[in-house]
Image (cartoon, rainbow, N blue to C red):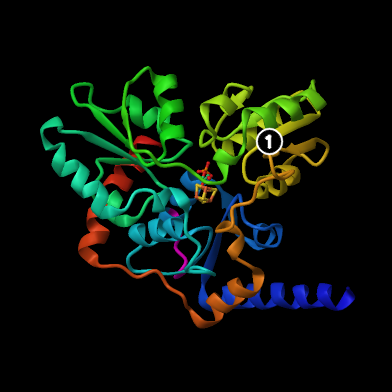
Protein backbone atom coordinates (compact mmCIF):
# COMPACT_ATOMS: atom_id res chain seq x y z
CA UNK A 1 0.00 0.00 0.00
CA UNK A 2 2.74 2.44 1.09
CA UNK A 3 4.84 1.29 -1.88
CA UNK A 4 2.01 2.09 -4.29
CA UNK A 5 1.63 5.55 -2.82
CA UNK A 6 5.40 6.08 -3.13
CA UNK A 7 5.34 4.92 -6.76
CA UNK A 8 2.61 7.36 -7.59
CA UNK A 9 4.49 10.20 -5.85
CA UNK A 10 7.61 9.30 -7.90
CA UNK A 11 5.55 9.33 -11.06
CA UNK A 12 4.07 12.72 -10.24
CA UNK A 13 7.55 14.08 -9.62
CA UNK A 14 8.80 12.63 -12.88
CA UNK A 15 5.87 14.16 -14.80
CA UNK A 16 6.47 17.58 -13.25
CA UNK A 17 10.20 17.41 -14.04
CA UNK A 18 9.54 16.31 -17.63
CA UNK A 19 6.95 19.04 -18.03
CA UNK A 20 9.59 21.62 -17.10
CA UNK A 21 12.29 20.06 -19.23
CA UNK A 22 10.01 19.86 -22.31
CA UNK A 23 8.38 23.26 -21.75
CA UNK A 24 5.07 21.41 -21.82
CA UNK A 25 1.56 22.19 -20.71
CA UNK A 26 -0.78 19.43 -19.50
CA UNK A 27 -4.41 19.87 -20.58
CA UNK A 28 -6.98 17.43 -19.22
CA UNK A 29 -10.68 16.80 -19.81
CA UNK A 30 -13.13 16.68 -16.92
CA UNK A 31 -13.58 12.90 -17.39
CA UNK A 32 -9.93 12.02 -16.79
CA UNK A 33 -8.98 9.96 -13.74
CA UNK A 34 -8.47 12.05 -10.59
CA UNK A 35 -4.67 11.63 -10.55
CA UNK A 36 -4.41 13.17 -14.03
CA UNK A 37 -6.82 16.00 -13.24
CA UNK A 38 -4.76 16.78 -10.12
CA UNK A 39 -1.49 17.17 -12.03
CA UNK A 40 -2.87 19.04 -15.05
CA UNK A 41 -2.34 22.75 -15.69
CA UNK A 42 -5.90 23.09 -16.88
CA UNK A 43 -8.94 20.83 -16.54
CA UNK A 44 -12.10 21.65 -18.46
CA UNK A 45 -14.66 20.89 -21.15
CA UNK A 46 -13.99 20.62 -24.89
CA UNK A 47 -14.52 24.33 -25.47
CA UNK A 48 -12.28 25.46 -22.61
CA UNK A 49 -9.62 23.01 -23.75
CA UNK A 50 -9.74 24.31 -27.33
CA UNK A 51 -9.30 27.88 -26.07
CA UNK A 52 -6.40 26.84 -23.81
CA UNK A 53 -4.75 24.97 -26.68
CA UNK A 54 -5.07 28.07 -28.84
CA UNK A 55 -3.60 30.37 -26.19
CA UNK A 56 -0.67 28.37 -24.87
CA UNK A 57 2.92 29.37 -25.56
CA UNK A 58 4.30 26.01 -24.35
CA UNK A 59 6.31 24.04 -26.93
CA UNK A 60 4.63 20.74 -26.12
CA UNK A 61 0.97 20.07 -25.36
CA UNK A 62 0.36 16.85 -23.44
CA UNK A 63 -3.32 16.29 -24.05
CA UNK A 64 -5.12 14.02 -21.61
CA UNK A 65 -8.50 13.35 -23.14
CA UNK A 66 -9.55 11.46 -26.25
CA UNK A 67 -7.97 11.58 -29.70
CA UNK A 68 -10.28 14.15 -31.35
CA UNK A 69 -9.47 16.62 -28.55
CA UNK A 70 -5.70 16.22 -29.02
CA UNK A 71 -6.23 16.45 -32.79
CA UNK A 72 -8.10 19.74 -32.33
CA UNK A 73 -5.14 21.06 -30.31
CA UNK A 74 -2.80 20.07 -33.16
CA UNK A 75 -5.04 21.69 -35.79
CA UNK A 76 -4.76 24.93 -33.83
CA UNK A 77 -1.02 24.50 -33.22
CA UNK A 78 0.71 23.07 -36.29
CA UNK A 79 4.16 24.09 -35.02
CA UNK A 80 3.81 22.57 -31.58
CA UNK A 81 4.31 18.99 -30.53
CA UNK A 82 1.02 17.48 -29.34
CA UNK A 83 1.32 14.20 -27.46
CA UNK A 84 -1.40 12.06 -25.92
CA UNK A 85 -0.98 9.28 -23.37
CA UNK A 86 -2.90 6.69 -25.42
CA UNK A 87 -3.39 7.12 -29.16
CA UNK A 88 -6.23 4.56 -29.15
CA UNK A 89 -8.43 6.69 -26.90
CA UNK A 90 -11.25 7.19 -29.41
CA UNK A 91 -14.88 8.25 -29.11
CA UNK A 92 -18.08 6.48 -30.15
CA UNK A 93 -19.48 9.73 -31.56
CA UNK A 94 -16.44 10.21 -33.78
CA UNK A 95 -16.77 6.60 -34.96
CA UNK A 96 -20.46 7.08 -35.79
CA UNK A 97 -19.63 9.55 -38.55
CA UNK A 98 -16.91 8.25 -40.90
CA UNK A 99 -15.41 10.85 -43.26
CA UNK A 100 -16.41 9.02 -46.44
CA UNK A 101 -20.00 8.46 -45.29
CA UNK A 102 -20.47 12.16 -44.61
CA UNK A 103 -18.90 13.01 -47.98
CA UNK A 104 -21.27 10.60 -49.75
CA UNK A 105 -24.30 11.99 -47.91
CA UNK A 106 -23.41 15.58 -48.75
CA UNK A 107 -22.83 14.68 -52.39
CA UNK A 108 -26.16 12.89 -52.59
CA UNK A 109 -27.89 15.91 -51.04
CA UNK A 110 -25.91 18.60 -52.84
CA UNK A 111 -29.07 20.34 -54.01
CA UNK A 112 -30.05 21.04 -50.37
CA UNK A 113 -26.98 23.24 -49.84
CA UNK A 114 -26.72 22.20 -46.19
CA UNK A 115 -25.06 24.43 -43.61
CA UNK A 116 -23.11 21.73 -41.75
CA UNK A 117 -22.72 22.17 -37.99
CA UNK A 118 -20.48 19.50 -36.53
CA UNK A 119 -19.93 18.59 -32.90
CA UNK A 120 -16.27 18.77 -31.93
CA UNK A 121 -16.47 15.00 -31.15
CA UNK A 122 -15.51 14.18 -34.75
CA UNK A 123 -12.45 13.49 -36.88
CA UNK A 124 -10.47 16.17 -38.75
CA UNK A 125 -11.82 14.73 -42.02
CA UNK A 126 -15.39 15.36 -40.87
CA UNK A 127 -14.54 18.80 -39.49
CA UNK A 128 -13.00 19.71 -42.86
CA UNK A 129 -16.41 19.14 -44.53
CA UNK A 130 -18.22 21.38 -42.03
CA UNK A 131 -19.13 25.05 -42.02
CA UNK A 132 -18.69 25.44 -38.28
CA UNK A 133 -17.87 23.30 -35.24
CA UNK A 134 -19.70 23.39 -31.92
CA UNK A 135 -19.30 21.91 -28.46
CA UNK A 136 -21.97 21.20 -25.88
CA UNK A 137 -20.97 24.51 -24.25
CA UNK A 138 -21.74 26.71 -27.26
CA UNK A 139 -24.05 24.65 -29.52
CA UNK A 140 -27.08 26.88 -28.86
CA UNK A 141 -25.12 29.99 -29.78
CA UNK A 142 -23.63 28.40 -32.89
CA UNK A 143 -27.04 27.23 -34.16
CA UNK A 144 -28.53 30.66 -33.46
CA UNK A 145 -25.80 32.25 -35.57
CA UNK A 146 -26.41 29.91 -38.56
CA UNK A 147 -27.81 31.42 -41.77
CA UNK A 148 -31.61 31.38 -41.75
CA UNK A 149 -31.94 30.67 -45.46
CA UNK A 150 -30.11 27.31 -45.50
CA UNK A 151 -31.13 23.96 -44.00
CA UNK A 152 -28.86 22.72 -41.21
CA UNK A 153 -27.28 19.30 -41.04
CA UNK A 154 -26.25 18.65 -37.44
CA UNK A 155 -23.64 15.88 -37.00
CA UNK A 156 -22.93 13.49 -35.43
CA UNK A 157 -24.84 13.55 -32.10
CA UNK A 158 -28.61 13.26 -32.57
CA UNK A 159 -29.23 13.77 -28.83
CA UNK A 160 -27.26 16.99 -28.55
CA UNK A 161 -28.94 18.02 -31.81
CA UNK A 162 -32.43 17.34 -30.42
CA UNK A 163 -31.69 19.43 -27.32
CA UNK A 164 -30.27 22.35 -29.34
CA UNK A 165 -33.22 22.18 -31.69
CA UNK A 166 -35.60 22.50 -28.71
CA UNK A 167 -33.57 25.38 -27.24
CA UNK A 168 -33.41 27.38 -30.47
CA UNK A 169 -36.65 26.36 -32.18
CA UNK A 170 -34.56 25.62 -35.28
CA UNK A 171 -35.41 22.46 -37.21
CA UNK A 172 -32.32 20.52 -38.26
CA UNK A 173 -31.57 17.29 -40.07
CA UNK A 174 -29.62 15.02 -37.73
CA UNK A 175 -26.83 12.56 -38.31
CA UNK A 176 -27.77 9.40 -36.39
CA UNK A 177 -24.86 9.13 -33.97
CA UNK A 178 -24.68 8.99 -30.20
CA UNK A 179 -22.37 8.61 -27.23
CA UNK A 180 -22.37 5.03 -25.99
CA UNK A 181 -21.87 6.23 -22.39
CA UNK A 182 -24.67 8.80 -22.20
CA UNK A 183 -27.32 6.65 -23.88
CA UNK A 184 -26.84 4.10 -21.08
CA UNK A 185 -28.74 6.36 -18.67
CA UNK A 186 -32.43 5.52 -18.92
CA UNK A 187 -35.64 7.16 -17.83
CA UNK A 188 -36.08 4.31 -15.32
CA UNK A 189 -32.56 4.49 -13.84
CA UNK A 190 -32.75 8.27 -13.35
CA UNK A 191 -36.35 8.24 -12.09
CA UNK A 192 -35.31 5.66 -9.48
CA UNK A 193 -32.36 7.69 -8.15
CA UNK A 194 -34.59 10.78 -8.04
CA UNK A 195 -37.10 8.87 -5.94
CA UNK A 196 -34.33 7.93 -3.52
CA UNK A 197 -33.20 11.58 -3.27
CA UNK A 198 -36.37 13.63 -3.78
CA UNK A 199 -34.74 16.96 -2.82
CA UNK A 200 -31.68 16.59 -5.05
CA UNK A 201 -31.74 18.49 -8.35
CA UNK A 202 -30.54 16.65 -11.46
CA UNK A 203 -27.96 18.07 -13.85
CA UNK A 204 -27.48 16.14 -17.11
CA UNK A 205 -25.26 16.34 -20.18
CA UNK A 206 -27.01 17.06 -23.50
CA UNK A 207 -25.62 13.82 -24.96
CA UNK A 208 -28.29 12.03 -22.83
CA UNK A 209 -31.49 10.93 -24.54
CA UNK A 210 -34.54 13.20 -24.53
CA UNK A 211 -36.32 10.88 -22.04
CA UNK A 212 -33.47 11.41 -19.53
CA UNK A 213 -33.12 15.12 -20.26
CA UNK A 214 -36.79 15.63 -19.45
CA UNK A 215 -36.08 14.46 -15.88
CA UNK A 216 -33.25 16.96 -15.42
CA UNK A 217 -33.42 20.36 -13.75
CA UNK A 218 -30.50 21.58 -15.82
CA UNK A 219 -28.83 20.42 -19.04
CA UNK A 220 -25.33 21.71 -19.76
CA UNK A 221 -21.74 20.96 -20.76
CA UNK A 222 -19.33 19.43 -18.26
CA UNK A 223 -17.92 22.87 -17.37
CA UNK A 224 -21.48 24.18 -17.01
CA UNK A 225 -22.01 21.43 -14.42
CA UNK A 226 -19.24 22.84 -12.21
CA UNK A 227 -20.96 26.25 -12.21
CA UNK A 228 -24.39 24.71 -11.67
CA UNK A 229 -23.25 22.75 -8.61
CA UNK A 230 -21.41 25.79 -7.23
CA UNK A 231 -24.51 27.99 -7.53
CA UNK A 232 -27.02 25.42 -6.27
CA UNK A 233 -28.55 25.91 -2.81
CA UNK A 234 -29.24 22.16 -2.51
CA UNK A 235 -26.52 20.22 -0.72
CA UNK A 236 -27.08 16.99 -2.68
CA UNK A 237 -26.99 16.93 -6.49
CA UNK A 238 -27.46 14.08 -8.98
CA UNK A 239 -24.91 14.35 -11.79
CA UNK A 240 -25.85 12.50 -14.98
CA UNK A 241 -22.71 12.15 -17.03
CA UNK A 242 -19.41 10.24 -17.09
CA UNK A 243 -18.20 9.49 -13.56
CA UNK A 244 -14.87 11.37 -13.80
CA UNK A 245 -16.90 14.55 -13.60
CA UNK A 246 -17.57 13.99 -9.92
CA UNK A 247 -13.88 14.36 -9.03
CA UNK A 248 -13.74 17.74 -10.76
CA UNK A 249 -16.97 19.05 -9.18
CA UNK A 250 -16.15 17.66 -5.73
CA UNK A 251 -12.88 19.62 -5.65
CA UNK A 252 -14.87 22.75 -6.35
CA UNK A 253 -17.68 22.08 -3.86
CA UNK A 254 -16.21 19.73 -1.21
CA UNK A 255 -19.11 20.47 1.15
CA UNK A 256 -21.77 19.08 -1.23
CA UNK A 257 -22.87 15.48 -1.76
CA UNK A 258 -22.69 14.42 -5.41
CA UNK A 259 -24.54 11.36 -6.61
CA UNK A 260 -23.53 9.85 -9.95
CA UNK A 261 -26.37 9.15 -12.35
CA UNK A 262 -26.80 5.34 -12.47
CA UNK A 263 -27.49 3.23 -15.54
CA UNK A 264 -29.65 0.09 -15.52
CA UNK A 265 -26.47 -1.96 -15.06
CA UNK A 266 -24.14 0.15 -12.88
CA UNK A 267 -24.09 2.75 -10.14
CA UNK A 268 -22.24 5.11 -12.47
CA UNK A 269 -21.02 5.30 -16.09
CA UNK A 270 -17.42 5.41 -17.27
CA UNK A 271 -16.06 6.16 -20.76
CA UNK A 272 -13.61 3.37 -21.57
CA UNK A 273 -11.71 5.70 -23.93
CA UNK A 274 -11.24 8.50 -21.39
CA UNK A 275 -10.08 5.91 -18.86
CA UNK A 276 -7.32 4.57 -21.15
CA UNK A 277 -5.05 7.39 -19.95
CA UNK A 278 -2.98 6.74 -16.84
CA UNK A 279 -0.20 8.57 -14.99
CA UNK A 280 2.27 5.98 -16.33
CA UNK A 281 1.26 6.69 -19.94
CA UNK A 282 1.34 10.45 -19.33
CA UNK A 283 4.91 10.18 -18.02
CA UNK A 284 5.89 7.99 -20.98
CA UNK A 285 4.45 10.35 -23.61
CA UNK A 286 6.35 13.28 -22.09
CA UNK A 287 9.52 11.21 -21.79
CA UNK A 288 9.43 9.83 -25.37
CA UNK A 289 7.49 12.67 -27.03
CA UNK A 290 5.33 9.91 -28.43
CA UNK A 291 2.63 9.13 -29.47
CA UNK A 292 2.28 12.44 -31.29
CA UNK A 293 -0.64 13.77 -33.30
CA UNK A 294 0.55 14.33 -36.86
CA UNK A 295 -1.49 15.46 -39.80
CA UNK A 296 -1.43 16.42 -43.40
CA UNK A 297 -1.23 20.22 -43.82
CA UNK A 298 -4.06 20.38 -46.37
CA UNK A 299 -6.41 18.53 -44.02
CA UNK A 300 -5.26 20.63 -41.09
CA UNK A 301 -6.01 23.89 -42.89
CA UNK A 302 -9.42 22.66 -44.05
CA UNK A 303 -10.40 21.55 -40.56
CA UNK A 304 -8.98 24.67 -38.89
CA UNK A 305 -11.37 27.11 -40.62
CA UNK A 306 -14.62 25.82 -39.02
CA UNK A 307 -12.90 25.54 -35.61
CA UNK A 308 -11.70 29.15 -35.80
CA UNK A 309 -15.24 30.20 -36.80
CA UNK A 310 -16.52 28.47 -33.67
CA UNK A 311 -13.94 30.09 -31.40
CA UNK A 312 -14.70 33.52 -32.87
CA UNK A 313 -18.45 33.01 -32.27
CA UNK A 314 -17.79 31.84 -28.68
CA UNK A 315 -15.85 34.84 -27.35
P1 LIG B 1 -17.95 18.54 -22.87
O1 LIG B 1 -17.48 19.43 -23.96
O2 LIG B 1 -19.24 18.99 -22.24
O3 LIG B 1 -16.88 18.38 -21.83
O4 LIG B 1 -18.28 17.11 -23.46
C1 LIG B 1 -17.31 16.31 -24.08
C2 LIG B 1 -17.70 14.90 -24.13
O5 LIG B 1 -17.05 14.09 -24.74
C3 LIG B 1 -18.91 14.49 -23.42
O6 LIG B 1 -19.09 13.12 -23.55
FE1 LIG C 1 -16.98 10.17 -26.73
FE2 LIG C 1 -18.98 9.56 -25.09
FE3 LIG C 1 -16.48 9.12 -24.31
FE4 LIG C 1 -17.44 11.66 -24.53
S1 LIG C 1 -18.09 10.08 -23.09
S2 LIG C 1 -15.46 10.91 -25.25
S3 LIG C 1 -18.78 11.42 -26.30
S4 LIG C 1 -17.52 8.11 -26.01
The image shows residue 52, relative to residue 284, as above or below, that is above
Q: Which residues are magenta?
A: 55-60
The image shows residue 135, relative to residue 236, as above or below, that is below
- 124 or 22, which is in the foreground? 124
In the rendered image, which residue does mark 1 sit on?
A: 239
Give x and y (percent) for residue 205.
Answer: 56, 35
Give x and y (percent) for residue 148.
Answer: 23, 21
- Which element carries disc 1, helix, strand or loop? strand
- Is 279 situated left or right of 4 in this image? left
- Which residue corresponds to the image point at 32% horizontal and 21% vertical from the top-left? 171
The image shows residue 110, relative to residue 180, as above or below, that is above
Give x and y (percent) for residue 64.
Answer: 55, 61
| Dominant SS in magenta | loop
Q: Dot 1: within a 10 Å radius of its alpha carbon, few (fewer than 14), some, or many (20 or more) residues?
A: many
- Which residue corresponds to the image point at 39% horizontal and 49% vertical from the top-left? 96
- Is 27 situated left or right of 244 in this image? left
- 255 or 111, which is in the foreground? 111
- Which residue corresponds to the image point at 44% horizontal and 20% vertical from the top-left? 167
Give x and y (percent) for residue 99.
Answer: 27, 54
Q: How many marks?
A: 1
Amino acid sequence: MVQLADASIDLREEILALKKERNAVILAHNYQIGAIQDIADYVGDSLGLAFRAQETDAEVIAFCGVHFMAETAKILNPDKIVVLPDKDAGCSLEQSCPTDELAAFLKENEAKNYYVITYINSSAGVKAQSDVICTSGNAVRIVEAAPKDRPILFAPDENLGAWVSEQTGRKMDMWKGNCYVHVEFTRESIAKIKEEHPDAPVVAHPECTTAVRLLADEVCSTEGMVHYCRDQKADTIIVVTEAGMLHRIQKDVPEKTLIPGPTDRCACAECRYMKMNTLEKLAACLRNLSPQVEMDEKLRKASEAPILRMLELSK
